[in-house]
Amino acid sequence: MKELFKKIVIAILTFEAKLLIRRTKPKIVAITGSVGKTSVKDAVYQVLKDHTHTRKSEKSFNSEIGVPLSVLGLRNAWHSPVRWFKNILDGALLILHPGAYPKVLVLEVGVDRPGDMDVLTSWIKPDVVVLTRLPEVPVHVEFFDSPEAVRQEKRKLVEALVPDGVFVYNHDDERVCAVAEGTPQQRIGYGVGEGADCRAEKEAITYEGGRPTGYTFTLTQGGASANCVVQESLGGQHAYNYAAAVAVGSVFGVAITDAAQALSENCTPPGRMRLLRGNKDTTIIDDTYNASPVAVERSLQSLKEVKGVKRRIAVLGDMMELGQYSIAEHERIGGVAASCVDVLVTIGVRARGIASGARAKGLSEKNVVQFDDANSAGRALLQMLEAGDIVLVKGSQSIRAERTVEILMAEPERATELLVRQGTAWKG
């Protein structure tokens, strides 16, 4: 009965969203890829919101139910049938009286299973598509025949681009470039490498009192350039995210200087390489939003780049939905960790492969510690911390690694403000 109710609700809300788009005719920016969708979405919104009336997907509303809710501007009713009926009613009223509906919709579009993108592109026809990255082993591959099948599913969004649309793509990813080569619409490549139309360069970590405080780089496009500062967050991924946002901004006439200024005023969402003060005069890199192999590898490299610390500690949890690639990828990430950290802490059964991979690559047995859950890891690590340590915490959503961060952080009373998954749906 619950599944039937869910299907009915999704069908009605999708129909309402389709009618609303047909009536209001907003420009649609759709973002997909296997890494960084939510961060790019937030960055694009930050660039466009002061230029034109813009709406973005809330949180990670990127599914067959999340996208219609975003179009309609409604909230997830979770397990409340009454609230779902209210959403349906509000959607119908909005079609009749749309009022000052946004001129631009910035939508995150994800896929979990084969056919998901077909459902969404049957009614979403984007004016701009952003494709972030297509790694060798993408997340959700467990539910597909192969990594290539995941990539082909995401490619369908590019194929749904309107004829006079614009394809914004990661110029540094060869698989994404292959998609671009077969796309007839206008293309704008972004990245940090030579040849990108919108490029981030001169990347550097900023410090204050010996403690990392953020990340800075210069964005260039079409002969113009502007400096960009990421406050209270680390990682070269921000350079990619912001370059993508500047590229999209250029489609809508936003100057690079204005875009960079807007991005420098942006606060990185919780759980995405956020810098937090830890107990015992330590620093935490909170990257607990989610985890895939390519994202974990990137975060470890960012940890390695931080200078002037006593010990680099990585707390890594299970990476979910990797299917037949799970064992090999966990062990591979362990090998990467061995070259980046002084101490490795793992959370979960799958993450034991990270521990074994690290030991195989030379990380000392005494510096590898394994736990079954996030709370146990946090309590034990709190006793191990020394002044000057920097701690990266990352794991798939179901590991709830934010609980480890809450134990380690200097201001746990601010957890609701600073950490991911603090709503009643997660706390209940």
Image (spheres, helix red, strand yellow):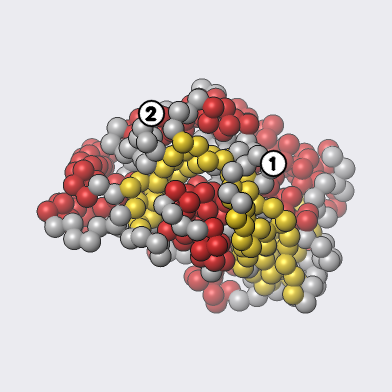
Q: Secondary structure at mark 2?
A: loop
- Write the residue at 63% across / 31% down: 174
Q: Relative to the observer, which residue lies in front, 398 or 305?
A: 305
Give the farthest residue toward the left: 96
- Write the residue at 53% across / 41% down: 188
State how far apart marks 1 and 2 are (Cα).
36 Å
- Write the residue at 41% across / 52% down: 252
Please state, as top left, top right, bottom left or bottom right, where the C terminus lies in the image.
Answer: bottom left
Marks 1 and 2 in Cβ contact (< 8 Å) = no
Q: Amino acid at mark 1?
A: Glu
Q: Which mark is residue 194?
A: 1
Q: Relative to 344, does residue 163 appear above or below in the rendering?
A: above
**Residue 113 screen position, x and y as percent:** 43, 32
Q: Which mark is residue 115?
A: 2
Q: Quadrant of residue 103?
A: bottom left
Q: Relative to the observer, which residue lies in front, 297 or 40?
A: 40
Q: Amino acid at mark 2?
A: Gly
Give the farthest residue toward the front: 223
- Write the residue at 21% across / 43% down: 22
